[in-house]
Image: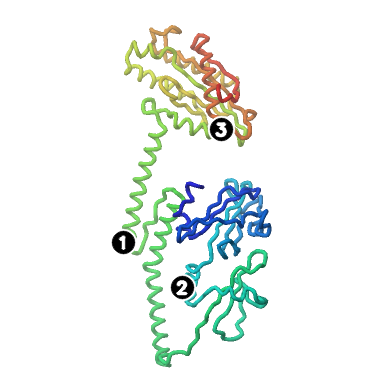
Amino acid sequence: MEENMVQDTFNSLKVDGIFYLNEKLEPIFTKGVHHLSDEELIFSFYNFKKYPLNSKILPIPINGEGAPHKEGFINTEYGPALFSAFQVRDSNKFGDNRGFLIFIQLIEQPFLDLLNQSTLTTISIDNDILDKNLNGLPLWGEGVIVEGVKPYRHILFQDTNGLPVIILKIKHSKGDLPPLLNEHSLIFISILSLFIYLFYHLITHTIIKPVKKLALSIKLIDEELGFKLLDDKFSVKELMVVSNNVNQLINTVQQQNDLLRKQATTDQLTNLMNRHGLLAVLEIHKDLCIRQGISFAVVMCDIDHFKQYNDHFGHLQGDQALVDVAQILKQQCKRANDYCARYGGEEFTLLFSDMSENDLQKKLLSISDAMKTLNIVHPKSQTAPHMTFSCGATIIKATDVVNHSLPISDMFKCADQALYEAKSTGRNNFVIKEFVTLAPDE
């Protein structure tokens, strides 16, 4: 919040104070800055221990759907002010209560000037009668019964405790109708009004509505952050041209985004998912395990003695071997939620959704048989005459979830330890290790 609530924020929002209190009404972030002079302001109204009545400015927090807020008027060290308070939810309108956000704007002359422009009248602060009997003064927001023409009228602003905050004095103007408004002028005004009405409807149906339709379609695209083609059927030729051009641009951007998305998640050599894409689908598996209790397996596969293969045959043939092995592994991922990725170098990672340990053993044996059938000759291997795999695997179950958390780094560490054990016991085999959340220094 410190990084976002800079001086310009107060200027643009036209507020003089922003305060965030946690659910215990303890101040977490408080900042007061005069939005016109940039002068630092120090408020204390939110100290509810000192000013317990001020706690009424906060909306009553709820646990169900919604985001309650409250607004009104309050006295501060710097004079009367408007306030607006909101309940802060955990992540959305259904989340847990996380406190309150309060905005303050001082009621000063610039505020009155804005009221003067909006109401075309003269409004000023009249606190001279605050010490007098205020009974009978109309309150802000209440309907006013007009009993007669007066030169001015008072409006009383009260805080949430019913105490007076400020009194505005509204000066009225009165006068007689100008002599130009006679019978002929009224007829002329009526005819002119009818002409303007007809002209307005003509412009509305031929220009304004089509433009609004196009603008609304573009706004929806911007708000939804999606790409939808615009309707290109307009009575105005120019709008049809604009719509067609925007549609062409949308198609081009969509194609470029699809290409960039594929490049960002695909290994260029093997055409498998790369590590970036692997982490994305691993997040999906993790969420399914946390929310729905669906287990999944992480398998780390490493080609045995691949460096010796590269040194003997050269990197070009080594790259071709990686491509062939990648296809073998990809064929083992037959279900929609199974994935194969190149983790890096000669190392690959497999993700299998909802797989028991017995089924995982069969799958790893199938991978070993497929490598033997592929029969990539490896004369420098100390394990077998053909290229082989060592695999380390772990199965993450719903019972492994602790405090709605599953550290992805621990999944890789556990599978990597299993891979190390498979290599240290002769290679060309696999080890399935029980998943455990590791200590930070492991």
CA separation in Å, label 3 and label 1? 51 Å
Q: Residues within 10 Å of mark 3 (few under 14, many from 20)?
A: many
Q: Using the image, tell me which numbered label, if any, was put on residue 435.
A: none
Up the image or down, 23 lies above or below 52; here it is above
Marks 3 and 1: which is nearer the front? 3
Q: Using the image, tell me which numbered label, if any, was put on residue 286.
A: 3
Residue 336 location, x and y as percent? Answer: 51, 32
CA separation in Å, label 1 and label 2? 38 Å
Tag 2 or tag 1, which sits nearer the N-term?
A: 2
Colour setup of the view: rainbow
Residue 171 location, x and y as percent? Answer: 52, 80
Up the image or down, 332 lies above or below 59; here it is above
Q: Quadrant of the C terminus?
A: top right
Tag 3 or tag 2, which sits nearer the N-term?
A: 2
Q: Nearer the viewer, residue 149 or 326?
A: 149
Q: Which residue is mark 2?
A: 117
Q: Which residue is mark 1?
A: 238
Residue 117 location, x and y as percent? Answer: 46, 73
Q: Nearer the viewer, residue 371 or 153?
A: 153
Three-letter amino acid code at disc 1? Answer: Glu
| Residue at (56% x, 49% y) in the render | 29
Tag 1 or tag 3, which sits nearer the N-term?
A: 1
Q: Residues within 10 Å of mark 2 (few under 14, many from 20)?
A: few
Up the image or down, 227 lies above or below 122; here it is above
| Residue at (49% x, 15% y) in the render | 390
Q: In the picture, residue 403 is in which quadrant?
A: top right
